[in-house]
């Protein structure tokens, strides 16, 4: 498996594969996937668009993620803005990278691909905060919830209903940038002397 950054045209070239992975990961019906295909095709032209893809050695798509700068006039942004207390709007939405989709094919789940995709995507993101929405679920049983918590996402809205969807969602957020990982010390390295 290898993870690669995608430009908008890269995603559009593999749109059939993206929709197929999305459908398998979310267990959505075919008619809903056709609607999502249209949304995804327009999302790639939004300001600040960033995308990553996980490819198998044979070039098959095992997972993907993308997002962009969240701004007024975008449906998701406007729904979340309307539900946030006024005091929180500036904090979360003034300079926000919205994680729109992050999926791993069910047959490839459980190997850390989602974490690698999310980490890479957030390191590529521009903004001081990032937000995403995920269906409400038992946090102890949901891989997505465990992943987001591990990355330091906190509750912004809970039990929120987007128009046209009967499911409750949580909106989670964290500040950016992510901390850079510390390089591992070589086991034979001498300890660094402390200055007094």
Image (cartoon, rainbow, N blue to C red):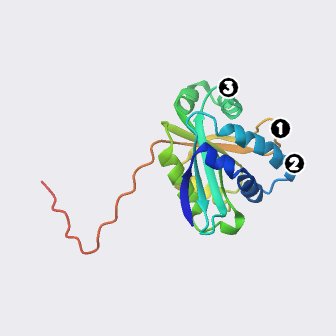
Tell me how far mark 2 sits from mark 1, CA to CA. Answer: 15 Å
Taking 127 as reference, is 56 above or below it? below
- Quadrant where the C terminus sits is bottom left
Residue at the spot x=62%, y=51% of the render?
65
Task: Answer few, some or many: residues within 10 Å of disc 2's Cα (few below 14, many 20 plus, some between 14 and 19).
Answer: few
Percent across and percent down for residue 172 are 61, 44
Q: Nearer the viewer, residue 13 or 30?
A: 13
Q: Specify the quadrant of the image occupied by residue 177.
A: top left
Task: Answer few, some or many: residues within 10 Å of disc 3's Cα (few below 14, many 20 plus, some between 14 and 19).
Answer: few
Residue 38 falls left or right of residue 96? right
Residue 185 visible in the picture: yes
Query: Which residue is denoted by mark 1 in the rendering?
Result: 164
Tell me how far mark 3 sits from mark 2, CA to CA. Answer: 26 Å
Query: Which residue is denoted by mark 2 in the rendering?
Result: 31
Residue at the bottom extreme of this rendering: 188
- Quadrant where the N terminus sits is bottom right
Q: Secondary structure at mark 3?
A: loop
Q: Nearer the viewer, residue 116 or 13?
A: 13
Residue at the spot x=63%, y=64% of the render?
59
Q: Which mark is residue 73?
A: 3
Percent across and percent down for residue 148 are 58, 52
Percent across and percent down for residue 81 are 65, 29
Percent across and percent down for residue 98 are 60, 39
Residue 157 falls left or right of residue 126? right
Q: Specify the quadrant of the image occupied by residue 103.
A: bottom right
Taking 1 as reference, is 13 above or below it? above
Question: Going from the N terminus, do you reach mark 2 or mark 1 first?
Answer: 2
Residue 140 visible in the picture: no
Q: Secondary structure at mark 1?
A: loop
Tell me how far mark 3 sits from mark 1, CA to CA. Answer: 18 Å
Question: Going from the N terminus, do you reach mark 3 or mark 2 first?
Answer: 2
């Amino acid at each position: 498996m290898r993870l690669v950054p995608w430009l908008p045209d890269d995603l559009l070239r593999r749109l059939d594969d993206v929709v197929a992975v999305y459908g398998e990961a979310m267990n959505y019906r075919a008619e809903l996937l056709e609607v999502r295909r249209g949304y995804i095709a327009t999302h790639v032209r939004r300001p600040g668009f960033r995308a990553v893809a996980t490819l198998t050695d044979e070039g098959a798509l095992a997972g993907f993620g993308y997002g962009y700068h969240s701004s007024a006039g975008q449906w998701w942004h406007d729904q979340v803005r309307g539900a946030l207390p006024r005091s929180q709007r500036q904090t979360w939405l003034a300079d926000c990278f919205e994680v729109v989709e992050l999926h791993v094919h069910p047959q490839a789940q459980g190997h850390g691909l989602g974490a690698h995709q999310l980490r890479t995507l957030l390191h590529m993101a521009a903004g001081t905060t990032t937000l995403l929405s995920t269906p409400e679920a038992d946090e102890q049983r949901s891989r997505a919830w465990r992943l987001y918590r591990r990355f330091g996402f906190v509750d912004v809205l809970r039990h929120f209903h987007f128009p046209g969807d009967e499911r409750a969602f949580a909106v989670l957020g964290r500040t950016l940038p992510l901390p850079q990982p510390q390089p591992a010390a070589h086991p034979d390295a001498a300890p660094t002397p402390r200055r007094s």
